[in-house]
């Protein structure tokens, strides 16, 4: 996972598989970061995710006091996010 931070936002680039095996490292990327900045979660490399990953995103949403954007997910990942009604919780961008 890669993290880029600037004055307005924190961008987290996810690995190919976002799952139980990677959720702790995902959490460690933001837990000590500002809650006031926007978060962008870059899904451009993700080909699969599981329920643990979905839960990790919800925990990030609780941590952040501002907007969380899910960006760059492929069509299959967007279908999973939409089926879980994440389009009602997060901003999903191409």
Image (cartoon, rainbow, N blue to C red):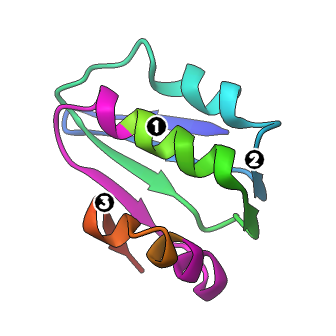
Q: Quadrant of the C terminus?
A: bottom left
Q: Which sits earlier in the primary sequence, circle 1 or circle 3?
A: 1
Disc 1 from disc 3: Cα separation:
20 Å
Disc 2 from disc 3: Cα separation:
19 Å
In the image, which disc is placed on residue 19?
Answer: 2
Which residue sits at x=28%, y=59%? 89
Badge 1 crowding class, 10 Å Cα cut-off, few under 14, some 14 to 19, many 20 or more, is few
Which residue sits at x=19%, y=38%? 8
Q: Which sits earlier in the primary sequence, circle 2 or circle 3?
A: 2
Q: What x and y, as percent, mark residue 27?
A: 56, 26
Q: Is residue 87 magenta?
A: no
Of the two numbered discs 2 and 1 in the rendering, the one whose residue sits closer to the viewer: 2
Which residue sits at x=61%, y=75%? 77
What is the residue that sits farthest to the bottom in this orientation? Answer: 75
- What range is drawn magenta here? 61-80
Residue on which the image places disc 1: 4
Q: What x and y, as percent, mark residue 69?
A: 33, 57
Q: Is residue 67 magenta?
A: yes
In the image, which disc is placed on residue 53?
Answer: none
Q: Can you tell which quarter of the image residue 23 is in?
A: top right
Residue 43 sits above or below residue 87 on the image: above
Q: Can you tell which quarter of the image residue 30 is in?
A: top left
């Amino acid at each position: 996972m890669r993290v880029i931070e600037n004055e307005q936002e924190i961008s987290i680039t996810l690995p190919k598989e976002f799952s139980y095996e990677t959720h702790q490292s995902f959490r460690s990327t933001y837990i000590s970061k500002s809650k006031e900045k926007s978060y962008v979660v870059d899904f451009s490399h993700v080909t699969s995710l599981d329920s643990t990953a979905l839960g990790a995103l919800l925990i990030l949403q609780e941590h952040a006091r501002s907007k969380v954007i899910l960006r760059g997910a492929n069509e299959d990942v967007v279908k999973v996010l939409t089926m879980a009604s994440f389009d009602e919780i997060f901003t999903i961008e191409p």
